[in-house]
Each structure stands twice: as structure tokens, then as C-alpha cells.
Image (spheres, rainbow, N blue to C red):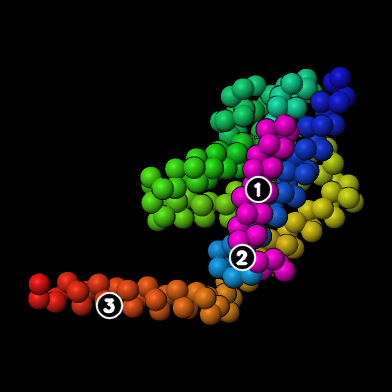
Amino acid sequence: MTDALWFFGRGSGVVTLVLISIVVALGVGARSGRPAFGLPRFAVSLLHRNAALLAMVLLAGHVLGLYFDPYAQLRLVDLVLPFAGRYRPIWLGLGTLAIDLIVAIVVTSLLRKRIGARVWRIVHRLAYLCWPLAVLHGVQTGTDGRTWWMWTVVAACVGMVLAAVAWRLSPGFARFPQRVERRVSASAAERSASALEGAPR
Ligand code: HEM
């Protein structure tokens, strides 16, 4: 049973890392407001949300598996308070910090309508910080961090996210016709609203 928890805890950690990387890349695609990765726009958003949900389930499995496994001797406090652990404290702490950020991102996404798009977007951008924390945690805390296959997985994740971020920062990202159209129609709406305000009743 202990071996099963140990392997499950580690395996689910690796899958979570892959999923989180996919979620970040899909998030960039969803933000672009256009078809991306060969998928229509709605499918990119849907996939982003569902991959995030799946990542949360696996992350819970990762943390609980390693919590109930005796090797790392995790305490409940280690799951929420970064850098308090006894097992590889710095690198474990980065994982805990990543989870804290993820909780903030998930909670604000659930409360999006109440808190407004601006606050939601600011908190959602924490995903860009959360992801490298998760990568460093995975490589440095894990028993498999030095294996060739783990390096291959991490290289693929890093390549995918860096490519998405490079696209996000490129000038072409904002120049998609629909985004321009949306901006044009928004400013047209603003103009007609202010014209109406100035019109005699
Ligand atoms: C976004 C959050 C997290 C991700 C993506 C993640 C991912 C990973 C990965 C990929 C590994 C390496 C597994 C291996 O070497 O086979 C790992 C190891 C580990 N993680 Fe996490 N983790 C996260 C958060 C946490 C948290 C919050 C804790 C507990 C406080 C935790 C506890 C551990 C422990 C104890 C190990 C070492 C297992 C070993 O020695 O092999 N992780 N994690």
C-alpha cells in the first residue's frame, strides 16, 4: 500500500505538471480570441477550463498521496504554508506556494462575476508565476528529477509554455481581425453612448 501511495504521489505530480503547462498554453490561446492549435475559439476556452479542472483533481491526488505516504513526512501545515516543511524545504515550499497561487486563481475564477473582470485578470496572471514555481518544485523535490525521462517531460513543458508566451508577447497577437473588430465596435458603442448623453431630450 505504501509503495502504491509513493508511486501514485509521484506519478500524479508529473501528470499535473504536464497538465498545468497545457493549461497555461491553452490560456494564452483562449486570450487570443481566435481559433488556435487547430481548434475553434470556443473549444480552446472549454479545453482550457476542463484541463484546469483535471489538473486540480490530479494535484489533490499528488498532495494527498504524498501526505499519507510516510516517506516525506508531510504535515497538514506543509500543504498550505510554504517553506515550513522538513523535506527539502525550499523546493517543497515552491510547490506549496504554487498551490496557494492556484487556489487564488480558482477562487477568483469562481467569483469572477462578483469581483469584476479587472481584478479577475490581475489574479489570473499569477498563473505565469505559478507555473515556473511548479516546474522548479517538480525537478528539485522529486526523486525522478535527474532521470532522462523527467528532463524530456520538463523540456517539452518548458518549450510549450515558452512558445505560447512568445506568441502572447509578439505584435501579431493583438492584430487578429476579431480583436480589432471588437475594439472598433466597443469604441463605436462608446461614441454613440456619449453622443446620446449630449443629445437634447
Ligand atoms: C502546482 C503544484 C505542484 C506540482 C505541479 C507538483 C509536481 C511535482 C512533481 C512533478 C514532482 C516530481 C515527482 C517525481 O520525481 O517523480 C513532485 C514531487 C513532490 N511533490 Fe509536488 N507538486 C506540486 C505541489 C506540491 C505540494 C503543495 C506538495 C506538498 C506540500 C508537494 C509535495 C511533493 C513531494 C513531497 C515531492 C517529492 C516526491 C519525491 O521525493 O519523489 N507537491 N511534485
**Sequence-first tag of 1 and 2:** 2
Mark 2 vs ligand 1: CB below 8 Å:
no
The amino acid marked with disc number 3 is Arg
Residue identified by numbered label 3: 191
- Tell whether label 2 touches label 1 (CB within 8 Å): no
Taking the spot 72% from the left edge, 69% from the top edge, the residue there is 38
Q: CA distance from mark 3 to mark 2?
A: 28 Å
Taking the spot 38% from the left edge, 47% from the top edge, the residue there is 115
Taking the spot 55% from the left edge, 63% from the top edge, the residue there is 31
Above or below, 77 relative to 169: above
Nearer to me, 22 or 7: 22
Q: Quadrant of residue 156?
A: bottom right
**Circle 2 SS class:** helix
The answer to whether 189 appears left or right of 79 in the picture is: left
Give the prevailing secondary structure in the magenta stretch. helix
The answer to whether 131 appears left or right of 188 in the picture is: right
Residue identified by numbered label 1: 50
- Stretch of the chain drawn in magenta: 36-62
Taking the spot 58% from the left edge, 34% from the top edge, the residue there is 82
Nearer to me, 195 or 94: 195
The amino acid marked with disc number 1 is Asn
Residue found at the very far right of the displayed protein: 148
Whether residue 94 is visible to the viewer of this picture, yes or no, is no
Above or below, 188 relative to 141: below
Q: CA distance from mark 1 to mark 3?
A: 38 Å
The amino acid marked with disc number 2 is Arg
**Circle 1 SS class:** helix
Quadrant the N terminus occupies: top right
Badge 1: residue crowd in 10 Å (few <14, some 14–19, many ≥20) = few
Locate residue 152, reporting x and y percent: 85, 55
